[in-house]
C-alpha cells in the first residue's frame, strides 16, 4: 500500500510555492475565525437580531470554511486527507443550506427593506405634514429615556426653544413639568399605554411662559414589537383657553347680574308695593267716606297712629329706594380705582357717624398699624365701613355699649383681609352665614329696623373689587365681618 | 273659636288685617274668628309646637306670607308638610302674599296649600276676601277636631 503523500510533495517542496499556499491558507482561516468571533460578539450584544436557523447556517458556513483552509495548510506537511474531505463535506452542506436559505429569504429581506424604507418615508411625510401645516401642532419622538431622537424644529418653535434638542432629555429641557405628565410618560414607556388630554393642561415653559396644551402620547414599537420610546403630538391651546376663561368670567358675571336682576324684579314687585298697599289701606281706614268702605269709627288716637304709620312707611320706602339705587350703582359708575390708604377713610366715617356713635356709647378701636393701602375707590370703602359700623352699633346687646375693633391681616397673598368685629348679638352662621349677604335679606323684625340692603351693598362692592366677604359669629358671641381687598 | 294663625312680618299689614276682621265682626260676621300672629316662619313653628303642648290653641287655618325674615313662607311650608307632627301637618294653609309669581304659586301648591292669593290692593277687597275665607273654612267646612 502506497502511503499518502503530504500535499507539499505536489509543490515538489518548492519553498516559495509551499510558503505561498501555507501562508494564504492560514490567513484565510484566521480571517474566517475572526469573522466568526466578531459575529458571536455581535449577536451577544444584539440578541434581538439573532435569526435562529439562518444565523446557525451563516455561522457554520464561515466556521467550516475557516477550518477547511486550516486543514489545507496542515496537509501541506501531513496527509489527513480524509479528515480534510469530511470538513469539506460539512462546508459544502452548510454552503448549500446557505444558498437555499438565501433563495428563500431574499423576497422576505426585500420586503423588510421596503418596509423600513416606507416607514422612514412615512415618518418624514408625517413630520413634514405636521411641521409645514400652519397650525399650532407639533410632533416629537423620544427614546426610552425620554431623549429626543432628533431635532424637531416646529416643536421647538411651539415651546420657545432655541437650540437643537436632538439627543437631549425632555426633562432637562422642561424642568417644571406637571408630575402627572411624568407619570403618564412612565406608563407609556413601561406598560405601553397611551393618553389623550383633550381638556387642556397647563405647564411652564423653560422661558417661564405658562402654556396650555392638548396632547396625545403613545409608545412607538421596534420591529420586534418592543416599546422603542414615546411619540408625542401636542397642540398649543393657550390662546383658546384664555378666550374660554375670559368667556367663562363673562358668563359668570352675566349669570350673577341676571340673578341680581331677577331679585331686583322681585323687590320691585314685592317690597315696593307692600308699603304702597299699606298707605292706601290706611288712607281708606282714615277716610272711609271718600272710598266707600265701612266706617270703623276710629278714635282720634287710632287715627293719629295711622297717620304716623303712613309717614313712617313713606320714610321706610324712601330709604329703601335710596338703598336699592346705591346697590344698583355699584360697579356701574366709572370710579377710577387706585391705591388708597384705608385708615383715613375709617377715621372720616367715624367722624361722620359721631352722633350715632356717641348716642350708643360705642367705643371703636382702629388698629392702624395693621393696615396697608388697598386698591379701591374711597367711596367704596366709605360705604362698606359706614354699613359695617352702623350694623355693629345696631345689633348690640340691649343696654350694653358696643365695643368695635377694626383691624387688618395678611391672610392671602395679594390681598388684605379687613375685619370689623363687635360684641353684639351675633348670629347663627350655620343657618344664616351666607343668607345675610343676600339682597333684601333681613334677620330681624322692627326691633332692628333696616332695609336689608346694607350687607348686600357691601358684598357687591367687595366682589366688584375682586375680593370676597364673609362673617364669623355665633349667637350672643358678637360678630366679625371680614372682607378681602387687593393690595 | 275659629283659630287663625296669621304669619306675616309687616306690622302694618297685620294691623290692616286686624282692622278688617274688626269690621267683619262689627257687621255681625266672622264673630268666631280669633286671630293669632307670628312674625316669621320660625315664630310660627314655635307657636305650633306650643299648640301641640296645649299652651296655645291649635290653628284651624294658617294665613301665610312668603317673604319674611329668618324663615320665609316656602321654607315654613317645607317644614310643615314634611317634618311637622301629623297633628299640625294637616292644618290648611292659605298663602296671602304680595307675590304674583306663578313660580312661587306652583312651589307652594306642591306643599298642598289650599289657595295662593296675591294680597288685594284695597281694604274693601281685603275685607271681602277675609269674609269669603271665613265662610268657606269656618262656616261651610268641617273644622279640625280639638287636640286630645
Image (cartoon, coloured by chain):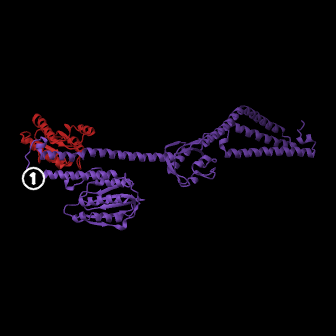
Q: Is residue A273 left or right of residue A254?
A: left
Residue B96 lies in quadrant:
top left
Q: At 50% across and 49% down in the image, what residue appears? A: A202
Q: Is residue A198 left or right of residue A352?
A: right
Whether residue B35 is visible here, answered yes or no, is no
Residue A303: image location, x then y, percent: 11, 50
Looking at the image, how many numbered discs can be counted on the residues? 1
For chain B, the rendered hue is: red
Whether residue A98 is visible here, answered yes or no, is yes
Q: Is residue A299 left or right of residue A235?
A: left
Q: Which residue position is annotated with label 1?
A: A301
Residue B140 lies in quadrant:
top left
Residue A53: image location, x then y, percent: 69, 36
Asked whether A250 or A426 is in front, the reply is: A250
Q: At 71% across and 45% down in the image, what residue appears? A: A40
Residue A270: image location, x then y, percent: 24, 45
Asked whether B6 or B110 is in front, the reply is: B6
The chain letter for the residue carrying disc 1 is A
Q: Is residue A189 left or right of residue A93?
A: left
Q: Most extreme residue toward the bottom, as rendered?
A: A369
Can you say which quadrant of the picture contains the C terminus of chain B? Answer: top left
Asked whether A235 or A52 is in front, the reply is: A235
Tag 1 secondary structure: helix
For chain A, the rendered hue is: purple
Can you say which quadrant of the picture contains the N terminus of chain B? Answer: top left
Residue B123: image location, x then y, percent: 15, 42
Amino acid at each position: 500500500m502506497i502511503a499518502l503523500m503530504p500535499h507539499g510533495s505536489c509543490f515538489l517542496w518548492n519553498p516559495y510555492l509551499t510558503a505561498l499556499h501555507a501562508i494564504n491558507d492560514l490567513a484565510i482561516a484566521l480571517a474566517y475565525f475572526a469573522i466568526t468571533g466578531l459575529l458571536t460578539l455581535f449577536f451577544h450584544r444584539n440578541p434581538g437580531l439573532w435569526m435562529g436557523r439562518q444565523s446557525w447556517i451563516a455561522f457554520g458556513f464561515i466556521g467550516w470554511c475557516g477550518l477547511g483552509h486550516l486543514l489545507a495548510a496542515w496537509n501541506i506537511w501531513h496527509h489527513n486527507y480524509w479528515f480534510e474531505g469530511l470538513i469539506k463535506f460539512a462546508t459544502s452542506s452548510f454552503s448549500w443550506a446557505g444558498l437555499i436559505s438565501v433563495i428563500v429569504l431574499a423576497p422576505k429581506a426585500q420586503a423588510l427593506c421596503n418596509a423600513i424604507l416606507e416607514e422612514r418615508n412615512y415618518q418624514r411625510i408625517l413630520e413634514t405634514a405636521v411641521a409645514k401645516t400652519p397650525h399650532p401642532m407639533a410632533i416629537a419622538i423620544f427614546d426610552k429615556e425620554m431623549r429626543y431622537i432628533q431635532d424637531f424644529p416646529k416643536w421647538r418653535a411651539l415651546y420657545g426653544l432655541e437650540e437643537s434638542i436632538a439627543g437631549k432629555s425632555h426633562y432637562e429641557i422642561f424642568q417644571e413639568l406637571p408630575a402627572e405628565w411624568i407619570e403618564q410618560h412612565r406608563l407609556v414607556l413601561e406598560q405601553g399605554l397611551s393618553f389623550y388630554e383633550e381638556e387642556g393642561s397647563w405647564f411652564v415653559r423653560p422661558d417661564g411662559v405658562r402654556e396650555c396644551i392638548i396632547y396625545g402620547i403613545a409608545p412607538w414599537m421596534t420591529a420586534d414589537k418592543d416599546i422603542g420610546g414615546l411619540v408625542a403630538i401636542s397642540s398649543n391651546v393657550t390662546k383658546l383657553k384664555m378666550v374660554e376663561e375670559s368667556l367663562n368670567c363673562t358668563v359668570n358675571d352675566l349669570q350673577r347680574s341676571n340673578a341680581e336682576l331677577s331679585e331686583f324684579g322681585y323687590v320691585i314687585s314685592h317690597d315696593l308695593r307692600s308699603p304702597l298697599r299699606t298707605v292706601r289701606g290706611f288712607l281708606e281706614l282714615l277716610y272711609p267716606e271718600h272710598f266707600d268702605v265701612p266706617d270703623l269709627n276710629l278714635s282720634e288716637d287710632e287715627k293719629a297712629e295711622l297717620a304716623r304709620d303712613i309717614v313712617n312707611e313713606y320714610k321706610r320706602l324712601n330709604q329703601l329706594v335710596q338703598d336699592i339705587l346705591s346697590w344698583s350703582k355699584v360697579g356701574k359708575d366709572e370710579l377710577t380705582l387706585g391705591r388708597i390708604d384705608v385708615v383715613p377713610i375709617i377715621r372720616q366715617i367715624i367722624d361722620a357717624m359721631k352722633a350715632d356713635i356717641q348716642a350708643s356709647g360705642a367705643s371703636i378701636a382702629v388698629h392702624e398699624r395693621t393696615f396697608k393701602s388697598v386698591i379701591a375707590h374711597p367711596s367704596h370703602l366709605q360705604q362698606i365701613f359706614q354699613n359695617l359700623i352702623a350694623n355693629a352699633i345696631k345689633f348690640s346687646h340691649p343696654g350694653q355699649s358696643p365695643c368695635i375693633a377694626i383691624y387688618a391681616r395678611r391672610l392671602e397673598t395679594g390681598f388684605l383681609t379687613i375685619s370689623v368685629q363687635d360684641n353684639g348679638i351675633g348670629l347663627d352662621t350655620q343657618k344664616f352665614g351666607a343668607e345675610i349677604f343676600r339682597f333684601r335679606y333681613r334677620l330681624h323684625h322692627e326691633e332692628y329696623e333696616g332695609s336689608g340692603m346694607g350687607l348686600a351693598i357691601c358684598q357687591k362692592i367687595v366682589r366688584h373689587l375682586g375680593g370676597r366677604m364673609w362673617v364669623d359669629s355665633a349667637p350672643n358671641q358678637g360678630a366679625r365681618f371680614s372682607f378681602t381687598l387687593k393690595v | 273659636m275659629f283659630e287663625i294663625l296669621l304669619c306675616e312680618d309687616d306690622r302694618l299689614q297685620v294691623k290692616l288685617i286686624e282692622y278688617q276682621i274688626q269690621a267683619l265682626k262689627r257687621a255681625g260676621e266672622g264673630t268666631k274668628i280669633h286671630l293669632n300672629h307670628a312674625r316669621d316662619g320660625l315664630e310660627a313653628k314655635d307657636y305650633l309646637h306650643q299648640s301641640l303642648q296645649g299652651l296655645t290653641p291649635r290653628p284651624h287655618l294658617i294665613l301665610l306670607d312668603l317673604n319674611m325674615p329668618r324663615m320665609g313662607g316656602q321654607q315654613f311650608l317645607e317644614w310643615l308638610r314634611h317634618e311637622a307632627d301629623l297633628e299640625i301637618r294637616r292644618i290648611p294653609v292659605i298663602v296671602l302674599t304680595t307675590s304674583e309669581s306663578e313660580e312661587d304659586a306652583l312651589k307652594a301648591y306642591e306643599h298642598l296649600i289650599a289657595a295662593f292669593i296675591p294680597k288685594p290692593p284695597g281694604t274693601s277687597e281685603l275685607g271681602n276676601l277675609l269674609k269669603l275665607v271665613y265662610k268657606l273654612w269656618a262656616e261651610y267646612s268641617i273644622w279640625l277636631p280639638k287636640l286630645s
